[in-house]
Image (tube, rainbow, N blue to C red):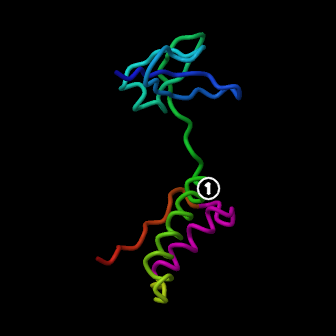
Amino acid sequence: MYKYYFITMQNGLVAPGICYSGPLPVGAVACTQEQYNNSAYYTLKEGAIIACTPPTLSLQTQAQTLLKTQQSYIMQAYTVYGDETPPEWVSYLKALRAIAGGADTTSTSLPTPPAVAV
């Protein structure tokens, strides 16, 4: 039977863990599987597990992450086959890039991706 836990790392961050056998690591606090599965919503305070709200990522950070995954998608769907990237995808990627790079500071949400052709 697995043992789930949280532990405070040397850098001060709290991380979830699973113990497959033996005792929990020194400093670990046992948690439920639900807490482990939703670890972004829990932290440790004075040796106890408490609920918390994860920090909200800025629009720029969201755009930076999404831009990487969408660029990868375009490479796999079009570029690797020598196909031209559809113009709506180029526009979408440019809008993401503007937010990600800080050129667009007025947007309050991420652009809507084009429909994916099946």
The segment highlighted magenta reads 88-106
Which residue does the image show at 50% across and 27% down from the upper left?
Answer: 17
Q: Which residue is mark 1?
A: 60
Does the magenta-highlighted stretch encompass residue 90? yes
Which residue does the image show at 69% across and 62% down from the upper left?
Answer: 102
Give the overall secondary structure of the magenta segment: helix
Image quadrant occupied by the N terminus = top left
Which residue does the image show at 51% across and 16% down from the upper left?
Answer: 24
Q: In the displayed structure, does residue 100 sit left or right of residue 89?
A: right
Which residue does the image show at 50% across and 30% down from the upper left?
Answer: 53
Q: How many marks?
A: 1
Does the magenta-highlighted stretch encompass residue 97? yes
Between 76 and 94, the one lying in front of the other is: 76
Above/below status of 52 relative to 86: above
Above/below status of 68 relative to 30: below
Q: Residue 15, percent across and down?
A: 56, 29
User: To which quarter of the image does residue 21 belong?
Assistant: top left
Between 105 and 7, the one lying in front of the other is: 7
The crowding category of the residue bearing disc 1, from other C-alpha atoms within 10 Å (few below 14, some 14 to 19, many at least 20), is: many
Please name the amino acid that badge 1 sits on.
Answer: Gln
Between 114 and 34, the one lying in front of the other is: 34
Q: Residue 93, percent across and down?
A: 54, 72
Q: Residue 9, percent across and down?
A: 65, 26
Mark 1 falls on what kind of element?
helix
Image quadrant occupied by the C terminus = bottom left
Q: Residue 11, percent across and down?
A: 71, 29
Above/below status of 107 relative to 90: above
